[in-house]
Image: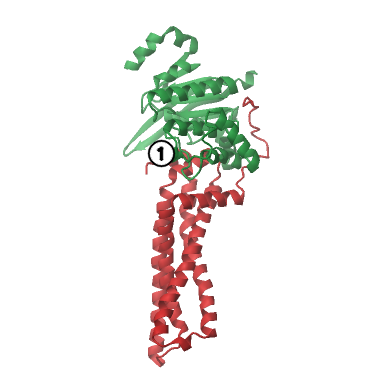
Amino acid sequence: MAANEYVVRTKGLVKEFRMGEESVRALNGVDLDIKRGEYLSIMGPSGSGKSTLFNAIGGLDKPDSGSVFINDVDMAQLDARELAYLRCHTIGYIFQTFNLLPSMTALENVTLPTVFAGLTTDDGIERGIEVLNLVGLGHRLHHRPAQLSGGQQQRVAIARALANSPSIVLADEPTGNLDLKTGEEIIALLRELNKKEGVTIISATHDYKMVDVSDRVVWIRDGKIAKIEERADIELAVGAIKDETEL
Amino acid sequence: MSTQTAPAPLGTPEKQITLPFSKAWEISIKSIKIRLGRSLITASGIMLGIAFFSSVRTVVLFPITQTGAAAEAARSRHSFLAIMALLVCFVGIMNSMLMSVTERFREIGTMKCLGALDQFIVTLFIIEAGIMGLFGSMFGWFLGWLIMVIPHLFGGGARDLNGAFFSGSMVQCVQSIAIGLLITLVACIPTARSAAKMPPAAALRSEI
């Protein structure tokens, strides 16, 4: 278990962006170990580097230095095909803007990753219906994204992220485009999936509703980890979090 | 159902990511349909270019009335017009392809997040462009052909529409479609390839 305890580990992540003459360090030496099966929130104001960290963990962008290990495999060592395989099987992605393919129905969107994974059409559809039921959209299989509300679209996106039974689900501001109530429902759904299915959830967010359900909260500031709070601390110090929101 | 699966077998050789042709075809058809207006405009761009080309070529099939130097001049003028038609067609299609790829950066990034290889993205764009190129060129050839044949008929040239004319027309039809397809693919492939190569994060960041 010891070797397998951490599903994601990052070591000394650095990422710079050039803004004209200046270069900005979006990540400035991030070391983070994420446990298998935990619900981790990466919190921080916009521009703190949390999306950059999200992209680095998800293999969507290469860090300038440092490494990301997924299940103890260094992502920098993977070729394009292996990286695609990793994105297909091991990681599920959820975005602020849902990013469903507009030409496809809910079911077709959810089935697409199973096509890449090599499932037959029948198996893919069966799996698609299963995960859409899981997120409570079994009655909206054949609707296009344009015919669904924001919350429903995000549910489809969550179902799609789960289609290939990933061990990690990465969510980038999953509630950012949703109203308060819908956002709460989505957070509750993610928490439920985390508990029932045992999938590790890593969420970059500045939605404080997320804090309540997280096992750990990583606070990012200026490209560095400012502090990491455990669930126990969070429950003890709800007032402190409220203070944090004022910052 | 349990998603608490063992870690994916990284480091094993059978790491296959697939996109069967039938699925790619299905996805491309859906993309064309959802953007039907845009697809029709792109296809009619191809159609008009090829219609111009085909009309210039069809004229050559009619008996030449001029003789000597005049015939020579007419022939070179036709070649010039045909080349111009193809150039205009190419630039127009290139523009449409750039547009249709650029406006879909986010879709491309999303597909890569779901495990698509760069090659899948290129395949999807090739199928789409191929369908539009094929139909655009087919209708284009026919339009150009009609534009030349109808006035010729009314001008009393029905006699010229003999077997040789029709077999010549068929050869030109195949030529026009082949050229139209080639132009479309030459415009499409480098554009799609460079878009597919982008890191997913960059593709997803794009705001169109």
A117 or A147: nearer the eye? A147
The C terminus of chain A, quarter of image: top left
The N terminus of chain A, quarter of image: top right
In this rendering, position of residue A15 left or right of residue A246: right
Q: Residue B149, how many percent across, how many down?
A: 43, 80
Q: Residue pushed farthest bottom?
A: B67
The part of the image, by quadrant, that contains residue A167 is top right
In this rendering, position of residue A118 left or right of residue A191: right
- Numbered marks: total: 1
Q: Residue A104, how many percent across, how many down?
A: 50, 43
Please indicate, yes or no, whether residue A119 appears anywhere in the rendered image. Answer: no
- Residue density around tag 1, few if under 14, some if 14–19, many if 20 or more, within 10 Å: few
- The chain displayed red equals B
Q: Colour of chain A?
A: green
Q: Amino acid at mark 1?
A: Arg
Q: Residue at (58%, 21%) from the top-left corner? A: A196
B103 or B83: nearer the eye? B103
Location of mark 1 (residue): B205
SS category of the residue bearing label 1: helix
Q: Residue pushed farthest top?
A: A236
